[in-house]
Image (cartoon, rainbow, N blue to C red):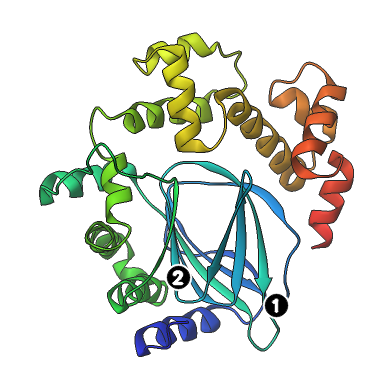
Amino acid sequence: MNNSKASQTLVDQVRAYSSKEGSYTTEIPGLEVHIRNTPTAPLHCIYSLGFSLILQGSKKLAIDNMQMPVEAGQSMLTTFDTPIVSHVTEATRHQPFLAIVLKLDYDQIMQACAELKLDKPDRNFDYHPISIQKMDDGIYRTMGRLLELVQEPEYLHSLIPLIKQELIIRLLHGPHGMQLRHIASMGSPSNHILKIVTWMKKNFTETVRMNELADQAHMSASSFRLHFKALTGSSPLQYLKNLRLQEAREQMLLNGLDATQASNLVGYESASQFSREYSRLFGLPPQKDIQRLRQN
């Protein structure tokens, strides 16, 4: 655990933001605060391009069959939308789990890489969509300045872009740097896959043919499937299915849709198939899963 003055200052800022557990969207666009007083049940979700700091407590991530613990003093960078199972493993009322999460902008990363003229990773670079590293005080101070802007709304629009740019520059030069440089490498397979993932997120209700997606990525079908799974952890079809099920779950949880309405909305023609695949992904049928989430 990082017990530096900078990290403790950020812990105090998060505790001052709210004394109650929950997930909070702050006044800073893309910045969230997460507080948990007890360990949580495993939750299926998709982590998007973003950066998070674990300030107190710990959690565990599962990607396919790989378990990844994340502890206080560590940070996590997600460079591709990645389906995972996540749960808080260490949290008490007196020592709650605390984390701060910031969505990153792909174009801002590309711009910073171009301006800094950084070396690209070599061909043998071992890329992972999720990177976990220890953090230095510079990152804590930068994130702290970002959270401070909640108390200074008159500076929000002018200073947010500058502080986010500083964070990206620090990340590019730090232990996460090669992961960011990899996705910014123009013409690399990851860049083509990222464009396909972006398209899929906007068009997940449409019928998709893998050969057409491979053509858009300028790859053969076999190469496309191989690179897609290496970067996202799942096949294109499974990834698309997870997007649909995640959206259906959100619609039921936030907008009160029933299972039939949600399945139709995300493109399922068979309610029974939707229920089977939903149960397989989330561990419970739709109605029981939503009840569990609301109780938590």
The circle on residue 247 is none
Give the residue type at disc 2.
Gln
Residue 125 can be seen, yes or no: yes
Left/right of residue 203 with respect to residue 29 in the rendered view? right
| Among the two numbered marks 1 and 2 on one chain, the one whose residue lies closer to the N terminus | 1
Q: Secondary structure at mark 1?
A: loop
Give the residue at mark 2: 74
| Residue 260 image-quadrant placement | top right
Relative depth, front residue between 48 and 186? 186
Give the residue type at disc 1.
Asn
User: Residue 217, position in %: x, y?
Assistant: 37, 19
Relative depth, front residue between 212 and 295? 212
Q: Residues within 10 Å of mark 1 (few under 14, many from 20)?
A: some
User: Residue 226, position in %: x, y?
Assistant: 46, 25
Left/right of residue 70 with respect to residue 128 in the rendered view? right
Q: Secondary structure at mark 2?
A: strand
User: Residue 92, position in %: x, y?
Assistant: 70, 82
Give the residue at mark 1: 37
The residue under the point 19% across, 43% down is 120
* Vertical position of residue 291 compared to residue 260: above or below: below
Relative depth, front residue between 14 and 257? 14
| Residue 189 image-quadrant placement | top left
Q: Quadrant where the C terminus lies?
A: bottom right
User: Residue 219, position in %: x, y?
Assistant: 37, 15
The residue under the point 24% across, 56% down is 172
